[in-house]
Amino acid sequence: MTGAAASPGRDPLAALDADRRAVLSSIAERLIPEAHGMPSAGSVVGDARLRFVLNARPDLADPLAAALRPELGDDPDARLAVLERDEPEHHAALVSTVVFGYYTDRDVRDRLGYPGQEAKTLYSWQLPEYIEEGLIDQVLARGAVWRDPTTGVRATATYPPLAWTEETP
Amino acid sequence: MAPEPADVLIIGAGATGGVVGRRLAEAGFSVVCLEQGRWHDRAEYRGAELDWELTMRKQWSTSPNVRGLPEDYPIDESDAEVSPLMFSGVGGSMLIFAGAWPRMLPSDFRVRSLDGVADDWPLTYEELRPYYERTDREFGVSGMGGDPAYPPGGEDPPLPPLPLGAGGLKVARAHARLGWHWWPEPNSILSVPYDGRRPCVQRGTCQQGCGEGAKASTDLTHWPKAIGAGAVLITGARVRRIETNAKGLATGATWIDEDGAEHFQPARVVVMAANAVGTARLLLLSASPQHPDGLANSSGLVGRRLMMHPFANVGGLFDEDLESWQGQFGCSIESFEFYETDEKRGFLRGAKWGLAPTFGPINAALPSRAGTQVWGPDHHLHVRSHLGRGANWGLFGEDLPDESNRVELSSTMTDSSGIPVPEIHYQVSENSRRLLDFHIEKASQSLLEAGAYKVEVDRLMRYSGWHLLGTARMGDDPTTSVLDRWNRAHDVPNLYVADGSCFVTSAGVNPTSSIAALALRAADHMVETRFNQQVPA
């Protein structure tokens, strides 16, 4: 099971004719317009991004095509309102496709300062900042938090200060 | 030709199937496990890929109804306020769990005696503690000993704690000012190399499979050792029913392979390890003349008392960048400040809090937890204010048992093998609603003290049924419980239920640590009583 589960060899954009693609672009422009130093989704979510989304999420293809059908007219706001009210699954597919395409664009992510989910090295044997600050000792000084099941009241156990050994495992 | 009877047949290769399978195989039992899912290669996990936030909403959803994979069975949840979540495969739901590994508290085992509601467990925290310590070592738990939320003494977690992250540190400092409990969360996620596995890289994608193998799951921690000791694990094996003989003893299981062919695996002892929905379903499916209401169900409690931990998410937004898309998921810190009963609050019992990361930009735009969608020019401000600038308290409220919350068999829906699917009936109690309201208010106070300029709340998340508990409770009285104190069915002396079905009460903590400890305790008992075990001829 991976993200790329579309039928091999079949362009997922084939199900979206030129009219539907134009509607998608207008919806994308409406949902995420150019503003605050960010590009519009209409300019970002082109063939490449759309192909990426539908390859990763082939389940979106049919509800997306339904959400973009010409019978719903030319007004993007009216289309979104009708879909949200009457066809929530088609509405979700349409909005998700725009968002998925937009936020998997490298330029958009760069502008947000989001590098993706990175791998970072842990240095778990080093003394954590919160111990140096005495935050753990403060918790310990307040004593037991648990309720003694034999008495039903907060336990009176005491806890020794933390002893931390710094060593490379 | 029918296969040889196994000493022990385990149904399900998840957390408890792995714990029991390893213990028994290493003790010399012949072990066969039937698992409806398959092995997953870590290369399949999407955490390091561009499509991570796309596939987490479908292929790697925690809901079998959303995933819709062939190895999943659908669940009729139309009468449930919370959706049950699970995963079918070797490792089970551990593949997609967060990894948080807190223990139950001493009072959790004495709810009836202390608070006059629900029931007491037939064992104590002190009795379970040695098993917690052993499973901590088996799974590789990172954490800090000495937490004053628990009795002093005993072994510390074997590995040092994972980082708090910038958000965790802010909240820890806030709790210091408030005088409230907090502690580094124990997680079954490696902070250092351990047992041939690599440590966590803080990618924050634990719930879509750990690409590093740092997060524990029994496909890594237990099944390779069990198989090395001789256990046989059959994947793609969907169990239809547990069979019994005229004496009412379990004789094995009938199962269906991926091509639809039916098989029978005989066994001397059967261990159910299919989670509190799957196990209840199978016991109900296994009705026979000797067990007309379902296997092991003379008490009428199989499938009843389903508990799922009503869950609220309280998210704080901060002015500065906390890089909160990173970090174990898992939790960074926990708080038990308001865990114990205080009747002045207007409800009984309490909740554990766990602080978690906040996902990437797609979740900022289309929040799966607390928050709203914003479109138009302000969309960009909305995403910038959420991406990397949040801290989420997850609140796990204790779910008191209620016999009307239950698993039944659907009369209208079947899985792809034609087997009736589970039908969930589950309503959140008034006690739970008041509990969550109180804890939401306190968690909001925590985040505001930490410097959050705004708090967003999801009061009762629908897709939060990670913790499936209670549908075959243990107890000393066969008329009011399904299992004895060793997880053995009162009605069927060679049938054990090792999973979270055995829970008497839910506690208010992530349960996998306790589920695993109880399973190991049951397996130890099976080893110790092996020469007295009643088996079919």
Image (spheres, rainbow, N blue to C red):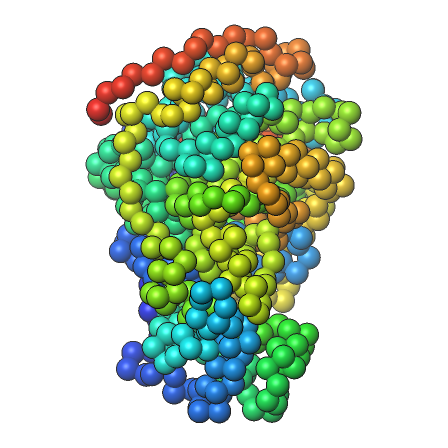
Residue closest to the eye, B239 or A114: A114
Q: Is residue A27 visible?
A: yes
Question: Which residue does the image show at 55% across and 12% down from the upper left?
Answer: A143
Q: Quadrant of the N terminus of chain B?
A: bottom left
Q: Is residue B535 above or below residue A9?
A: above
Q: Horizontal and vertical percent for residue B21?
A: 35, 38
Identify which residue is drawn at 42% across, 77% down.
A43
**B116 relative position to B153: left or right:** right
In screen coordinates, is B38 left or right of A80?
left
**Residue at image coords 36%, 25%:** A128
Of residues B24 and B216, the one nearer the viewer is B216
Q: Is residue B532 left or right of residue B441?
A: left
Q: Is residue B279 visible?
A: no
**Location of residue A15 by image quarter:** bottom left
Which residue is nearer to you in this view: B263 or B68?
A: B68
- Could you tell me which residue is drawn at 23 percent across and 20 percent down? A167
Q: Position of residue B351 (x, y in %)?
A: 62, 33
Question: In the rendering, at what x and y percent does residue B268 appear?
Answer: 39, 39
Pinpoint residue B101: horizontal percent, then vertical percent.
45, 33
**Vertical placement of A124 versus A26: above or below?**
above
